[in-house]
Amino acid sequence: PAHSALQMLAIAQAMPALCVLIGRALAILSGAINSFSSSEAFQKYHPCKEFQMLEFHVPDMTCGGCVAAITKALQAIDPNVAVETDLARHQLRVQTTASSETVRATLVDAGFSPEQAAS
């Protein structure tokens, strides 16, 4: 089911006219159909939100455990987040619908010291 949801997400992003239909399908798959009509549920499961790529230098990200902790924390604020890391350079790339402020605060709450890279 997760693979199917990712496929539907890709289709919805490629064909904006299908966004609402795909969003409803994702809500059904996620068990939220009863609350889908609410604005909060719609925002959570709507697949066509704007994604942005954020880059951070995280000096205290030094191992796989750090990457796992960062990924888990970011997935809590955005279940569809994509995380890329370069441990040697302490670089973190995050593709998300969350704001840079929210991502940074989440990283700090997880015990890290992120510095946003210049765009």
Image: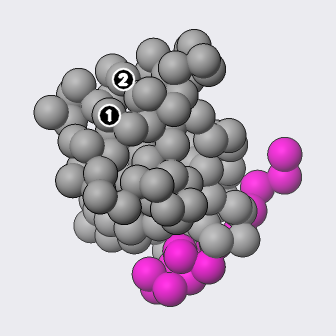
Name the residue at the right extreme.
Answer: 119
Residue type indicated by callout 2: Met
Label 2 CA crowd tier, 10 Å (few <14, some 14–19, many 20+): many
Q: Position of residue 115 (x, y in %)?
A: 71, 69
Q: Which residue is mark 1?
A: 25
Image: magenta residue range: 104-119
The residue sitting at 60% across, 67% down in the picture is 103
Q: Which mark is residue 64?
A: none
Q: Which mark is residue 8?
A: 2
Coloring scheme of the render?
A: one colour
In this view, the residue in front, 81 or 36, is: 36
In this view, the residue in front, 26 or 102, is: 26
The residue sitting at 33% across, 46% down in the picture is 27
Residue type indicated by callout 1: Ala
Residue 89 visible in rendering: no
Label 1's element? helix
Instruction: State yes or no: discs 2 and 1 in contact (Cβ < 8 Å).
Output: yes
Left or right, 78 with respect to 117, comes to: left
Residue 7 visible in rendering: yes
Q: Position of residue 91 (x, y in %)?
A: 57, 52
- Quadrant in the rendering for residue 53: top right
